[in-house]
Amino acid sequence: MHPILIRNNVKILGEGSQVIIFAHGFGCAQSSWKFMTDAFLEDYRVILFDYVGSGESDITQYNHFKYSTLDGYACDVVEIIEALDLIDVIFVGHSVSSMIGMIAALQKPKAFKKLVFIGPSPRYLNDRDYIGGFEASDIELIFSQIADDYADWAKGIAPVVMDNDDKPELTNFLLECFEQTEPSIALSFAMATFKTDCRERLKDLTIPSLTLQSSADPMVPTSAVEYIYANTPKNFLVVMEATGHYPHICEPDETIREIKEFIAERKTLRKEEDQLSA
């Protein structure tokens, strides 16, 4: 097996010819897609992977300098695509992986056909008129809590970001995902995530993209996804009925439906505009 595929614990599933890559968010691993992947196996070739330091990736390959920015993670995505000699990829990224996927698509645009952003943010930090949802003091507190006691931080944040109190089993599942990440790597990934500013890169993405946003997301305010929609060519925005930052876990059927409609090109700008004004 190619060393890149070993490094990122790449799994290849499905029967179809169209390739779809699922990229997990901060603190998770490819297992976070378990509620969705079966719906794509008949018609797609599904690629799953773990970022280095997450899940069952090869942690010995972790490089603090490389992964201090999202570009390092995007480089891994491109390397996986090159190792498998893929073209016309549909990339589905959750949370920070949305911007990682965008950066990868800018690095190697001919390899990508469409991108799906689930709960994305181009910048988490509030900046003058831009509302990303966090003040600098909020972000520094997160770093401090992760550094002091990552396990305790994870236990506190999991129910907040899942935001589905009637489904405690999903919160427990998310917590188990968090616990797979080595604390120092979690802190480094958090820093790369919360310090990033991808706003200026959005205008350069000409590949069609879909933004899926929960109706209530404790991590990403609507203003952030509206910024993506307004500043990214060929971007479509859907505000879902799902709540929380993990709609692919708590409401997989709705998430699957929206992704498949986008892939099938049944989305129109009018639909997104109607949802925003509702």
Image (tube, rainbow, N blue to C red):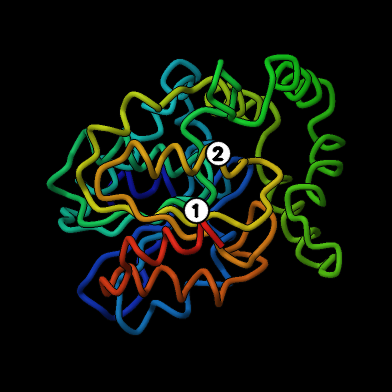
Label 1 residue SS: strand
Label annotation for residue 256: none
| Residue 170 position (above or below residue 14) | above
Distance from disc 1 to disc 2, alpha carbons, whole Å, reads 15 Å
Tell me, for residue 223, which label it has, or none: 2
Which image quarter: residue 141? top right
Q: Quadrant of the C terminus?
A: bottom right
Q: Position of residue 3 (x, y in %)?
A: 31, 43
Which amino acid type corresponds to the residue marked 1 in the rendered image?
Ile
Earlier along the polypeptide chain: callout 1 or callout 2? 1
Q: Give coordinates of residue 52: x percent, y percent.
A: 48, 37
Q: Residue furthest front?
A: 277
* Residue 157 at x, y percent in the picture: 80, 42
How many tags in the picture?
A: 2
- Asked whether 205 or 180 is in front, the reply is 205
Residue under the image location 84 percent in, 27 percent down: 149
Q: Which mark is residue 118?
A: 1
Image position of 200 with respect to 231: above or below: above
Measured as percent of width and height from the top left, residue 47 is found at 36, 61
Q: Residue at x 51, y 28 (%)?
A: 123
Q: Are marks 1 and 2 in contact (CB under 8 Å)?
A: no
Residue at the spot x=35%, y=35% of the render? 74
